[in-house]
């Protein structure tokens, strides 16, 4: 046996449908129509003769039976993670997690077998987990709706496993290359028509010496370059055993992200504007093989990471991985009970399968009794790992970096126009009145785009213009912008959301404080799995604005008048802004930490030096409850313009009073919450405290205090609170928002 190296080494039905839907969220595509037809091979398909020879041999070897291979057995560990987050969310939620372990057997006579050893499934966003009742009881999580959901997951798990004869991304046949995840979404680089759509070039060569066998294995790389930036084509690296032309490693990603409006325009018309653009990015797909018995290349590990994006709000990250070990090759005996009596509580099912070529095989699936299945000792103690566990962080970074150099540097010019509700281009406030905009996006390459935005308000008739060049993917991006636009003074309250616009138009509840900025900025932003940060250099001319309209629909029924806008100081500023946010923990019934920090240092007509931070913690407490606290504060260490002060009040900082009610050069705030334990639907009680004023007058003795009660759904994604200020302010406020503490 060759020692391990990077190349060698040893739910209920609705959950099932929902899980498959999550896969589709990332692989949002149709078959690559027109790509698979055989075409004349172009003269520039191969950069060198060595690449041409190796690719021709690899195509012939693709479906060739592995000589001398009669059977193999191995133990497979599979893990799937699906999350839900947004750029404005303080933390990511886990939608679905699954870990399964199985013993697999393949025989050349067409027989296959799967014996499930262990399985664990969780839907953390509703507090469901198939771990044993004793474990959950110890942690205080069993009871009420949570116990019912868990019982349903556990009850249907064995029957679902009996029907599972195809595993995501895994092919039993040792001659299968397992290169493409899913069917027909991209043109296979080893297909007969590939040369019409790809170019191939020889890459590196790796020599592995096996002293005990007095043998050298030579691995050769083929670099795959798509002829155009098309989601149905891939860019990547293929490594082959030079002797057998067997695939031993592959890493690739689509030539560009999937965009519903470009790739499926007819389907895009049926999507509501609030969810546009619908896009999907596959960061990488990689598969590796190990050499068994110094002769057979068998699959060792596989990983896919991707993310679907719905509009500017929601992101759905996906990770699929598996690894196989404990191989036994050409052994007639098997540990899988394919025939004969089974232990009490076990079940077995055989299924006949016929593939596209008419080849028939039989799959036998064996499932142990439920308690043994969900308590299998080799299952991970906890879920919540978004990154592939079969690969190190360094390996993942290398994969991503390698693929970035292989993407095509050209792109077909195809601009895209966004308008209406898409990207928040319709809004209403007391400065602009009804404001409508359009954005044109011009792709300049697979990782470069130019955005041109224009909008105008009916009330102030002031054009808002912006031009931005983006470079990079959404997770790591440079942005160079020039702009003339209306902005909010507060970093905690966004008056341009749909909810704020509806409140302003219907009830006159526009509590935003505004200014107009004209200038330019250069920003670099990183959005990692647990940490997001950005650094922006800017030059801005900041100017005050006036109320443009006092119209709202219920004005005849109310005595309230529309409030004036605080007058921003006229200043020209140049400087740097930094923002950082992070979180730890995905289990809603475990420890969850979140934090944020922001800072600004600028000069010009005024000197501004300020910083603010916040941190929160939530954790289960006795009696089936959970508790949370959040602390925040900030200060400005210089005399600056009004718009550089901190504005406190409203949903994000101090419930029970109007947004931006308090402001000053320093502030502090705190909140505490107590809620029921079931993450799917919670009832909570809370209190908020806060103060804002001059830094020289900073005090903790005279805060505004509010109390209230609320309800949340899906681990705090949707939250409704009724709050009342009881000190220094009075009155009831209703808060409907996304991304609560829980």
Image (cartoon, grey):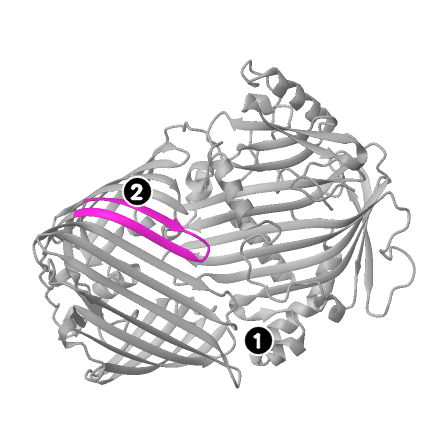
Mark 1 or mark 2, earlier in chain: 1
Could you tell me if residue 120 is visible in this image? yes
Q: Is residue 521 magenta?
A: yes
Q: Determine which quarter of the picture holds residue 111.
A: top right
Residue toward you, 431 or 42: 42
Give the SS element for disc 1.
Answer: helix
Q: Number of marks in the image?
A: 2
**Which circle, 1 or 2, is nearer the viewer?**
2
Separation of marks 1 and 2 at Cα, in angstroms: 45 Å
Q: Residues within 10 Å of mark 1 (few under 14, many from 20)?
A: some
Of all residues shown, which one is farthest toward the top? 43
Magenta highlight: main SS = strand
User: The N terminus lies in which quarter of the figure?
Assistant: top right
Horizontal side of 44 relative to 349 (left or right) equals: left
Residue 545 x, y percent position in the rendering: 10, 56
Give the SS element for disc 2.
Answer: strand
Residue toward you, 47 or 294: 294
Q: Residue at x 51, y 62 (%)?
A: 94
Q: Which residues are magenta?
A: 520-539
Looking at the image, residue 89 lies above or below residue 258: below
**Residue at label 2?**
479
Q: Residue at x 47, y 49 (%)?
A: 308
**Residue at label 1?**
146
């Amino acid at each position: 046996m060759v020692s391990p190296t990077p190349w060698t080494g040893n739910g209920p039905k609705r959950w099932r449908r929902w899980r498959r839907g999550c896969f589709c969220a990332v692989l949002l595509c149709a078959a690559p129509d027109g790509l698979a037809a055989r075409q004349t091979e172009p003269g520039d398909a191969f950069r060198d003769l060595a690449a041409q020879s190796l690719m021709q041999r690899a195509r012939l070897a693709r479906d060739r039976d592995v000589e001398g291979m009669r059977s193999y057995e191995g133990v497979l560990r599979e893990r799937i993670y699906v999350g839900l987050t947004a750029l404005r969310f303080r933390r990511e939620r886990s939608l679905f997690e699954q870990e399964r372990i199985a013993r697999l057997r393949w025989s050349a006579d067409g027989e296959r077998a799967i014996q499930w050893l262990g399985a664990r499934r969780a839907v953390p966003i509703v507090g469901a987990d198939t771990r044993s009742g004793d474990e959950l009881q110890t942690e205080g999580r069993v009871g009420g709706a949570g116990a019912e959901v868990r019982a349903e997951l556990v009850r249907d798990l064995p029957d679902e496993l009996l029907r599972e004869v195809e595993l995501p991304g895994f092919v039993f046949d040792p001659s299968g290359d397992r290169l493409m995840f899913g069917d027909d979404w991209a043109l296979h680089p080893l297909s007969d028509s590939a040369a019409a759509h790809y170019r191939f070039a020889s890459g590196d060569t790796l020599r592995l010496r096996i002293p005990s066998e007095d043998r050298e294995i030579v691995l050769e790389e083929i670099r795959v370059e798509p002829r155009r930036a098309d989601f149905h084509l891939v860019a990547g690296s293929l490594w082959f055993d030079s002797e057998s032309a067997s695939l031993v490693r592959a890493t690739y990603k689509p030539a560009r992200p999937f965009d519903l409006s470009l790739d499926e325009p007819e389907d895009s018309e049926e999507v509501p504007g609030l969810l546009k653009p619908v896009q999907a990015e596959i960061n990488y797909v990689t598969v590796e093989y190990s050499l068994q018995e110094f002769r057979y290349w068998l699959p060792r590990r596989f990983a896919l990471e991707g993310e679907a994006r719905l509009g500017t709000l929601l992101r759905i990250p996906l990770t699929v991985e598996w690894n196989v070990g404990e191989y036994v090759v050409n052994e007639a005996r098997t540990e899988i009970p394919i025939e004969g009596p089974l232990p009490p509580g076990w079940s077995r099912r055989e299924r006949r399968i016929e593939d596209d070529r008419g080849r028939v095989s039989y799959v036998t699936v064996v499932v142990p009794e439920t308690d043994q299945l969900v308590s299998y000792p080799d299952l991970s103690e906890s879920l919540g790992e978004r990154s592939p566990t079969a690969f190190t962080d360094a390996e993942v970074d290398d994969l991503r970096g390698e693929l970035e150099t292989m993407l095509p540097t050209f792109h077909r010019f195809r601009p895209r126009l966004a308008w209406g509700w898409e990207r928040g281009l319709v809004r209403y406030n007391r400065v602009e009145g009804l404001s409508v905009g359009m954005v044109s996006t011009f792709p300049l390459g697979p990782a470069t785009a130019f955005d041109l935005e224009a909008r105008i308000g009916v009330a102030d008739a002031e054009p808002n213009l912006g031009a931005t060049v983006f470079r990079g993917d959404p997770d790591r991006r440079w942005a160079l912008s020039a702009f003339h636009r209306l902005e909010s003074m507060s970093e905690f309250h966004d008056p341009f959301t749909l909810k704020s616009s509806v409140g302003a138009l219907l009830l006159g509840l526009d509590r935003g404080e505004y200014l107009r900025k004209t200038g330019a900025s250069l920003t670099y932003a990183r959005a990692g799995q647990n940490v997001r940060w950005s650094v922006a250099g800017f030059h801005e001319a900041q100017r005050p604005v006036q109320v443009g309209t006092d119209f709202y629909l219920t004005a005849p029924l109310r005595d309230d008048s529309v409030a004036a806008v605080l007058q921003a100081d006229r200043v020209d500023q140049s400087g740097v802004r930094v923002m950082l946010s992070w979180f730890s923990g995905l289990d809603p019934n475990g420890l969850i930490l979140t934090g944020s920090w922001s800072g600004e240092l600028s000069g010009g007509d005024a000197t501004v030096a300020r910083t603010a931070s916040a941190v929160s913690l939530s954790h289960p407490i006795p009696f089936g409850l959970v508790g949370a606290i959040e602390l925040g504060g900030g200060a400005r260490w210089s005399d600056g313009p009004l718009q550089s002060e901190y504005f406190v009040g409203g949903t994000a900082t101090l419930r029970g009073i109007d947004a931006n009610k308090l402001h000053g050069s320093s502030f502090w705030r705190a909140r505490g919450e107590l809620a029921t334990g079931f993450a799917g639907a919670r009832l909570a009680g809370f209190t908020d405290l806060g103060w804002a004023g001059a830094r020289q007058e900073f005090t903790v003795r005279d805060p505004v205090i509010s109390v209230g009660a609320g309800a949340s759904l899906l681990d705090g994604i949707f939250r409704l609170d009724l709050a009342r200020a009881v000190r220094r302010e009075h009155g009831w406020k209703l808060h409907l928002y996304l991304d609560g503490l829980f």
